[in-house]
Image (cartoon, coloured by chain):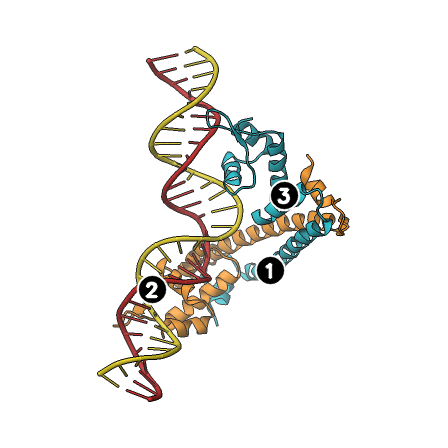
Chain colours: A orange, B cyan, C red, D yellow
DNA sequence: ATAGGGCTTCCAGTCACGGGAAGGTCAAGG
DNA sequence: CCTTGACCTTCCCGTGACTGGAAGCCCTAT
């Protein structure tokens, strides 16, 4: 498979696939013409990466997870630790965003949104 | 005020304040020695920026908001539009993160987290 | 005179790619 | 045989909003 085909298969942009090779997440073969040649194993890895990224894991998390995935003697505790850390980070982010959302909602609701200049949003941002 | 003092006053890192000058959000005076000299007006603007950034507004949003803030003839509708857009973006982000969180929680709960290699997290990421 | 802290500019790095240029390769059609 | 157009290659720059660090000037106190 050339990069175009595997890109269609995995749904990952060709740019992303080349990037993943650059940083050592995958290592496809090369044909005589210099084109990358992807095998079943690469397809599998790229799908793995796509799903892990969709869950918000960082690239470094993905690197760790891939290594664990390929290590038949891994302990599931190691995988769980990575996932739990990530889960906590996500929960923190949600909490931060919720607090922003609540403040913003409050301000937006308080603003008349007409052609007059008076605005509680700017008043809130502006005063000490 | 020198940059160190205004940094303490506003809670913004000096680096950030210089950056805001670079991109034209503020324009402090300069003393004979080349040092930035911040006035009341700069302090006010920087506090405004700090609060807007804390609410998650982008720098470009902040630029717009600052301009509206300084325009006595603004329409509050313009401010509200910026804030509502941002609110929607935040709500989308929260929804995305929640869906990640739910999937992750599910997987984490299903994982034994012991020294055995079998792991539903990896199984989920790995299979088509 | 020197030590220290604060200030200046400039350059590079972050994260995970995306855009685009310049050029090689391949299969089909005239 | 030549051209066209789709595909592939590498390389470099840009993103957002800073952060870190180097090299060097300024100011005050000892």
Chain of the residue under the numbered disc 1 shown in the image: B
Using the image, determine if residue D2 lies above or below residue B127. below
Chain of the residue under the numbered disc 3 shown in the image: B
User: Can residue A14 be seen in the rendering of this structure?
Assistant: yes
Q: Which residue is depicted at the point 64% across and 53% down? A: B86
Chain of the residue under the numbered disc 2 shown in the image: A
Q: Which mark is residue B66?
A: 3
Q: Which residue is depicted at the point 47% across and 57% down? A: A79
Task: Label 3: state its secondary structure.
Answer: helix
Using the image, determine if residue D11 lies above or below residue C9. below
Using the image, determine if residue A112 lies above or below residue A128. below
Badge 2: residue crowd in 10 Å (few <14, some 14–19, many ≥20): some
Of residues A87 and A107, which is closer to you in this image? Answer: A107
Task: Label 2: state its secondary structure.
Answer: loop
Image side of residue B51 versus residue D9, left or right: right
Task: Label 1: state its secondary structure.
Answer: helix
Check disc 2 and report the residue beneath it: A27
User: Can residue A71 be seen in the rendering of this structure?
Assistant: no
Distance of mark 1 from mark 3, alpha carbons? Answer: 30 Å
Check disc 1 and report the residue beneath it: B96
Number of numbered markers: 3
Badge 1: residue crowd in 10 Å (few <14, some 14–19, many ≥20): some
């Amino acid at each position: 498979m050339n990069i175009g085909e595997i890109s269609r298969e995995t749904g990952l942009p060709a740019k992303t696939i080349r990037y993943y090779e650059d940083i050592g997440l995958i290592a496809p073969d090369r044909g005589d013409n210099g084109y990358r040649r992807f095998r079943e194993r690469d397809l599998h890895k790229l799908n793995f990466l796509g799903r892990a990224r969709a869950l918000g894991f960082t690239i470094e998390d993905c690197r760790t997870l891939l290594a664990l995935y390929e290590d038949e003697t891994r302990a599931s505790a190691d995988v769980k630790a990575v996932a739990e850390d990530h889960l906590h980070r996500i929960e923190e982010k949600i909490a931060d965003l919720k607090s922003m959302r609540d403040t913003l909602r409050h301000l937006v609701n308080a603003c008349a949104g007409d052609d007059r200049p008076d605005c509680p949003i700017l008043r809130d941002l502006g005063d000490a």
